[in-house]
Image (cartoon, rainbow, N blue to C red):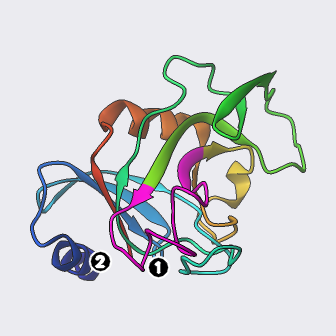
Amino acid sequence: MIAAIDIAIKLLGHAPARWLLVDTGRQRLTLMRGVAPQADWPISTAAAGLDARENSGGTPPGVHRIDRKIGAGADPGVVFVDREPTGEVWDGRPDPRDLILGRILPLAGCQDGVNRGAGVDSLARYIYLHGTNHGHRIGEPCSHGCVRLRPADVIEVFDRVEAGDPVVIV
């Protein structure tokens, strides 16, 4: 984890007061206060690895910020499509669909040509931190680019961050 923190701080240029570190090697999301880890959750990033290109299915690397917070107060099982609640609530039973549940933290890239701009734009690619109905796969890279969390975990993260907070993916 120390190596991932060092890489992230080099990308950021300093350690912000509050930020999120997505460590794809460890499949962990860490809430940071400066250089001190505050909380940690298991995640799943892309099966295709780190890749910001459109249609790559990869998780985009580098510095992002939370664009906004979507889903405050919603049921943990609420299903979202295109960043909007559908009215459906997942009941916890196995479902082969790849559902976006509970809360959404859309990521806006901060690095031109890396994760922002034509062909690599994280926000345009709909890259999020979000809840998933495939909690049994958390800990293995299996998403289509997003950072997946268990529904209870995404709610905890959502409640501890704000729009504009940095998110560094390494």
**Image coords of residue 125 (percent x, y):** 61, 61
**Image coords of residue 126 (percent x, y):** 60, 54
Image quadrant in which the C terminus is located: bottom left
Report the disc number at residue 25: 1
Which region is colored magenta?
108-130
**18 up-or-down from 26: above or below:** above
**Image coords of residue 100 (percent x, y):** 69, 42
**62 up-or-down from 38: above or below:** below
Side (left or right) of 126 relative to 63: right
Nearest to N terminus: mark 2 or mark 1: 2
What residue type is disc 2 on? Ala
Q: Which residue is mark 2?
A: 4
Question: Residue at point 59% right, 78% down?
Answer: 53
Res 78 visible: no
Question: Residue at point 29% right, 77% down?
Answer: 4
Residue 54: image quadrant is bottom right
Question: Residue at point 9% right, 67% down?
Answer: 14
Side (left or right) of 13 relative to 92: left
Q: Between residues 115 and 19, which one lies in front from this camera angle? A: 115
Image quadrant in which the N terminus is located: bottom left
Residue 169: image quadrant is bottom left
Q: CA distance from mark 2 to mark 1?
A: 9 Å
Res 128 visible: yes
- Let me know if residue 112 is in the magenta part: yes
Are dots 2 and 1 in contact, CB under 8 Å? yes
Question: Residue at point 79% right, 29% down?
Answer: 90
